[in-house]
Image: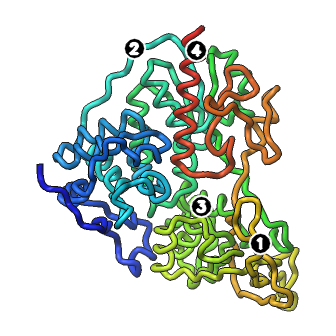
Amino acid sequence: MPKLNMNPKKNPMPAQDPKVRAHNFSEVATGYDKETAIDEALRCLNCKNMPCSSGCPVNIRIPEFISKVKEGDFEAAYQVISRTSSLPAVCGRVCPQETQCESKCVRGIKGESVGIGRLERFVADWHNEHYSGKPEIPASNGHKVAIVGSGPSGLTCAGDLARKGYKVTVFEALHTAGGVLVYGIPEFRLPKAIVRKEAENLKALGVDIETNIIIGKTLTIDELFEKGYEAVFVGSGAGLPNFMRIPGESLKGVYSANEFLTRSNLMKAYKDNPVTPIMKGGKVAVVGGGNVAMDAARTALRLGAEHVYIVYRRSMEELPARREEVEHAKEEGVDFRLLNNPVEIYGYNNPDDRRDPKNGFVTGIKCIKMQLGEPDEKGRRRPVPVPGSEFDLEVNTVIIAIGTSPNPLIKSTTKGLEVNKHGGIIVEEGTGLTSRQGVYAGGDAVTGAATVISAMGAGKTAAKAIDEYLSKK
C-alpha cells in the first residue's frame, strides 16, 4: 500500500476555462483521472469511527469505498457506494459535501477535507464507463409498491425496495424520468446522460418507470390502491414556483426559475430551432441567492445574455448557494448586486409608455438598497430597506428564483392527506408515514425545496418503513 498523502490541500478539480465554458453547455468540471483519484484517496486516514459517514444522509461507508480506490479497485469501490446509494454519479456532482460528509472529515481540521464527492463521482463514472454486466434481479416477494415522482427521493425509494424483491412502479408526470435532476439542474452541472444511466440501472433491477402520468389527474392515489398496489410513496417534489407579488410580474420577459430552467434543461431551448421558446440575449436579472439562482444566471449567460445580475437582499455571507457554484458564477462573469431587493418590474407596450407595469415587455426593475438588522427566527440577520435608496436597473429579462412549494394537486385529490401551512405533506418522523394508511412521502413534497441528498435520505427512510409495514401483511 502506498504511503498516505499528507498534502493539506485537495487535488484540484479539472475544469473548463471560464471564458470558454460560459458559452457552452458542456460539463464545467471534467473529473479526476485514475492517478489523481488514487492520490486523493491516499489523503484519507481511514478513521475507525468514520465521522464522515455520520454526515451522509444515505450513510455511505465512506472510508471503506475510499480504501478500495487506494487499491485501484474502482469497481469494488462502486459496489460499496451502491449498497446504500442509488444515484452515486448524481450525488458526486450535486451533493453539498462541504456541509455534510466533508465537514466531518478529520483532515479538514488542519487543512482541506478529503475530496469525498470528487472521489464518488470518479468511481461512479468509472463504473458506468467500464462495467457491462447486469445486476441480478432479486426474487419477488409478491408485494407491489407505487412511487409518485421520479426525482431523487422517488428513485432512491424505488431502488431500495426493488433490491428487497418488491415489484415497484414509478409514475412520472413529465416525458422523461429524473424529476428535478432533468428539469431543474443544468446540463453543465449534471449531464442528462448521467441521469438516464442512473434510471437505466434501476430498470435493470426490475423497476418499471411510466412517464406522462400525472397522479391526481391521470390516476389518483385511491385508484393506485384499487390496482393492487399495497403502499404508495409520494415523492412529487416542489414544482410550484413562488413569486414576490410586486408590480410587473406579469410582464413578458418575467420567468420563474422553474419555468426558465425547465425550458432550457428539459425542452432544450438552447438549441437552434427549439421546440419551446425562451428569451435569449440582452440583460438579465436573477432574483435570489440559492443554487437555483446560480443555475438560472449561468444558464442565461450560456443562452447569450450580454450581462447577468444576481439581485439578492442579503450579503455574500448569507448567500445560501454552494460556495463552488458562487465561485463558478463569478468566474464566468455574473454580476452580484447584493443587499438589494426588487420592488417593481416595469416595461412598455409602446415607445411612449415605457413604465407600464401591466403590459408589454420588461425594460427594467426598480430596486431598494437593504441593510442587515436583527436576526430572524432562523438566526439570519433580517434585511431592512434603506429609505430613499431606490434605483433602476435596466434589464430585458427577470428570473424569479426565491423558492418553490409543493403542488397542491395530490392533496386536493387524496382524502385524508394532511398538509402543513406551506403545502408540505405532514409525515411521521423516522418513517415518512402520512395521515393515510399505506401512504408515505418524502423529499421536497414534504420539506419544500431542499437538497438532492436530503431527498434521497427521505426516500431511504420511507423504503425501510414500507418494507416493515408490508412484511407484516
- Of 373 and 65, which appears nearest the observer? 373
In the picture of the structure, the residue carrying the numbered disc 1 is 374
Front in this rendered view, residue 256 or 291: 291
Q: Nearer the viewer, mark 3 or mark 2?
A: 2
| Mark pair 3, 2: CA separation | 40 Å
Q: CA distance from mark 1 to mark 2?
A: 58 Å
Residue type at mark 1? Glu
Which element is circle 3 on? helix
Q: Earlier in the sequence, mark 3 or mark 2?
A: 2
Nearer the N terminus, badge 4 or badge 2?
2
Residue at the spot of label 2: 139
Q: Secondary structure at mark 2?
A: loop
Q: Residue at x 50, y 28 (%)?
A: 208
Q: Earlier in the sequence, mark 1 or mark 4?
A: 1
The C terminus: image quadrant: top right
Q: Which residue is mark 4?
A: 470
| Residues tagged 4 and 2 counted as in contact (Cβ below 8 A) | no
